[in-house]
């Protein structure tokens, strides 16, 4: 049996019949399609979407934003569902590149369908076409190759029969998922072909729970039994595997402490006696202390970014060994580890059964429990004092006020600026969904678009976004989409008139916050060191359709949050925060190169500190 459809029509007909199943539960894989239309897709994918209203189309305002929304939705759905994103050729396509990189780096599935130049080449060069004197077989869509887990160009209708299943194979792979890009020439999208009817039947893709090699498991169990100071590094893979409950059983029974990466924070409850909180360059004092001493490190679903390893300086024990549990063979071998290549949930269950009655020494368990309580007491003081209470309010007090206001099932979103480091240390996470931080790419402009995606994925939960003025000015467009779709969430807009995070980093390497504050240029000095720029964030947010509620201190912030919860549309709580009063770091390092030669005394001093810190690095 054949079915005559255009390439675009066949694409949508195929996608809307793709489902996934894990642990016996079935989900539609695609929740619909975000898109902005132009001459590269309006007659193809656009026309096909119009004929398929059951595959819902969502209008958006920025191509980068729609990829962030799709990825955030996928993250909230534990990678079991996502969106399609379509654009015209040229700038519409390349605007998606940042989102594509973000999704691939964070191992989040998104499907991109950018329009492309004519396959026939007859009208070339068309509007927005990149020309090359070396080849005619290139377009700007080739830029997606390094940031996609799978890339293809559909130059003939029949190629779709083979490309679409391959796209689904990658999108549904626990180990290899990320951005999939199918580049679609605008003429080919409209070409008809007699596709096999079976191509459009419902297909359910089983998401497997891969088990590691039994010999490696037994060896890992022996390593753990022989350890005096083991520690677990919980990454995002714990959440995607839905392994939080078994990790809690594992650490409660055996007593191994858990430190969390940015992606893994919330894997265990903050008040679990074995929880050390954030681990790494921005970690808690006690997570760093235990990591320094650890003789066996069990990494679960982590890719060991430089923040997690403090640029390979945090694991100081000369005899330290690593066991890595990861669905990705690439990641399971990192740190020269004993690789347990498999799903986190089933691997932990099988490892627990092999450990029998083993437990860590009582003194170690008691020490960890005391650290958990002592750190919670320290967080209480930071939330209370915040290094000063005079206006403008400290960022730590904003975080603490929100943390205390939110219910256990609510969701907090952040991605960039100085907030991730503070949140990693301070946030009292109450569950896997409570803490949503994009720090694989730390994408400025992610937060508001992500809020839309997360709220679409979890409509019954309250969603709160912490967004700095820098990120807001880069990408606030999807407030309009949220208003259009009736999707309500709350944005905490923190204004400190500049790039606080990079300003602090600039100061640490001796460059005195150069180019990081939003100020007028002074005629006398020629530098950007004049008065603060007069941006009216309240009027801006209101013009996009949001309700805006100003706050100046903890009391007015609580009041604003209570009012925001009662609003019928997306609300912005506007808060001016102090640029310089920040939460201190502890005994960990993050490598940022410092100029080896400089006329600046502050840079020279920073370089000497840098040389000393480099001595701590270890290559395993």
Image (tube, rainbow, N blue to C red):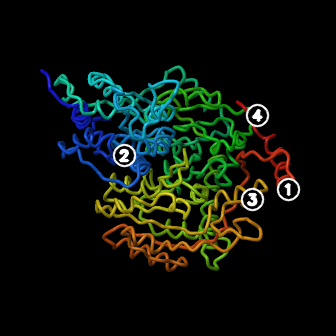
**First-in-chain label (2 vs 3):** 2
Q: Are marks 1 and 2 in contact (CB under 8 Å)?
A: no
The image shows residue 256 at horizontal and vertical percentages of 58, 42
Residue at image coords 68%, 54%: 285
The residue at which mark 1 appears reads as 600
Q: Find the distance from the CA under tag 3 to the CA under tag 4.
A: 33 Å
Confirm whether residue 343 shows in the render.
Answer: no
In this image, 604 relative to 262: left or right? right
Query: Residue tagged by mark 4?
Result: 318
Query: Few, some or many C-alpha atoms within 10 Å of disc 2 (few <14, some 14-19, many ≥20)?
Result: some
Q: Answer whether labels 1 and 4 touch (C-beta < 8 Å).
A: no
Q: Earlier in the sequence, mark 1 or mark 2?
A: 2
Q: Which of pointers 3 and 4 indicates the residue nearer the eye?
A: 3
Q: Is residue 289 left or right of residue 605?
A: left
Is label 4 in contact with label 2 (beta carbons under 8 Å)?
Answer: no
Is disc 3 placed on a helix, strand or loop?
Answer: helix
Q: Quadrant of residue 361?
A: top right
Q: Between disc 1 and disc 4, whose residue precedes?
A: 4
Q: Which residue is mark 2?
A: 77
Crowd tier of the residue under label 4, counting other residues whose Cα lies within 10 Å: few below 14, some 14–19, many 20 or above: few
Q: Nearer the viewer, mark 1 or mark 2?
A: 1
**Mark 3 or 4, nearer chain start:** 4
Question: Of discs 1 and 4, which sits in the foreground?
Answer: 1
Q: Secondary structure at mark 1?
A: loop
- The earlier-in-sequence mark between 3 and 1 is 3
The CA distance from mark 3 to mark 1 is 12 Å
Asked if residue 558 lies left or right of residue 87, the reply is right
For the residues marked 1 and 2, what is the alpha-carbon distance in whole angstroms?
A: 50 Å
| Label 4 secondary element | loop
Q: Which residue is mark 3?
A: 507
Specify the quadrant that holds the C terminus.
top right
Position above or below: 80 against 66: above
């Amino acid at each position: 049996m054949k079915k005559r459809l255009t390439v675009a029509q066949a694409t949508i007909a195929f996608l809307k019949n793709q489902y996934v199943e894990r642990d016996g539960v079935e989900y539609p894989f695609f929740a619909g399609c975000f898109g902005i239309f132009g001459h590269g897709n309006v007659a193809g994918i656009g026309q096909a979407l119009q004929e398929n209203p059951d595959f819902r189309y969502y209008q958006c305002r920025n191509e980068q934003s729609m990829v962030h929304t799709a990825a955030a939705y996928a993250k909230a759905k534990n990678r079991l569902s996502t969106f399609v994103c379509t654009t015209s050729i040229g700038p519409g396509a390349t605007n998606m590149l940042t989102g594509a990189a973000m999704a691939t780096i964070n191992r989040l599935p998104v499907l991109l369908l950018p329009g492309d130049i004519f396959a026939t080449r007859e009208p070339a060069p068309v509007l927005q076409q990149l020309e090359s004197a070396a080849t005619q077989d290139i377009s700007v869509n080739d830029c997606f190759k390094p940031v996609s887990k799978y890339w293809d160009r559909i130059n003939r209708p029949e190629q779709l029969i083979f490309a679409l299943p391959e796209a689904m194979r990658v999108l549904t792979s626990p180990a290899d998922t990320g951005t999939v890009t199918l580049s679609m020439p605008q003429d080919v999208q409209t070409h008809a072909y007699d596709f096999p009817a079976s191509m459009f039947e419902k297909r359910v893709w089983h998401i497997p729970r891969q088990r590691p090699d039994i010999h490696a498991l037994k060896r890992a169990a022996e390593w753990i039994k022989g350890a005096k100071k083991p520690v677990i590094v919980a990454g995002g893979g714990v959440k995607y595997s839905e392994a939080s409950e078994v990790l809690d059983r594992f650490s409660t029974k055996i007593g191994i402490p858990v430190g969390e990466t940015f992606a893994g924070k919330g894997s265990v409850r903050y008040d679990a006696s074995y929880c050390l909180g954030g681990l790494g360059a921005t970690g808690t004092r006690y997570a760093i202390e235990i990591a320094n001493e650890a003789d066996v490190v069990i990494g679960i679903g982590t890719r060991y970014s430089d923040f997690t390893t403090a640029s390979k300086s945090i694991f100081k024990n000369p005899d330290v060994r690593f066991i890595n549990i990861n669905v990705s063979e690439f990641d399971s071998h990192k740190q020269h580890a004993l690789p347990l290549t498999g799903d986190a949930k089933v691997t932990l269950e099988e490892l627990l059964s092999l450990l029998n009655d083993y437990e860590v020494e009582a003194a170690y368990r008691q020490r960890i429990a005391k650290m958990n309580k002592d750190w919670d007491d320290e967080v209480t003081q930071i939330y209370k004092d915040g290094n000063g209470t005079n206006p403008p309010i400290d960022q730590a007090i904003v975080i603490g006020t929100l943390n205390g206001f939110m219910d256990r099932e609510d969701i907090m979103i952040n991605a960039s600026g100085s907030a991730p480091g503070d949140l990693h240390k301070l946030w009292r996470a109450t569950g896997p969904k409570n803490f949503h931080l994009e720090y694989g790419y730390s994408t400025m402009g992610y937060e508001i678009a992500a809020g839309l995606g997360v709220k679409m994925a979890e409509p019954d939960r309250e969603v709160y976004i912490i967004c700095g003025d820098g990120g807001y000015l880069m990408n606030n467009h999807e407030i309009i989409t949220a208003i259009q779709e009736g999707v309500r969430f709350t944005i905490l807009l923190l204004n400190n008139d500049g790039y606080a995070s990079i300003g602090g980093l600039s100061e640490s390497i001796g460059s005195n916050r150069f180019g990081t504050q939003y100020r007028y240029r002074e005629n006398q000095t020629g530098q950007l060191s004049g008065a603060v720029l007069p941006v009216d964030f309240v009027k801006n947010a209101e013009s996009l359709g949001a309700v805006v509620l100003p706050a100046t201190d903890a009391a007015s912030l609580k009041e604003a949050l209570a009012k925001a919860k009662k609003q019928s549309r997306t609300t912005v709580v506007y808060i001016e925060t102090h640029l310089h009063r920040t939460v201190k770091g502890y005994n960990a390092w993050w490598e940022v190169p410092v100029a080896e030669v400089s006329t600046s005394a502050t840079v020279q001093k920073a370089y000497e500190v840098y040389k000393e810190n480099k001595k701590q690095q270890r290559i395993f």
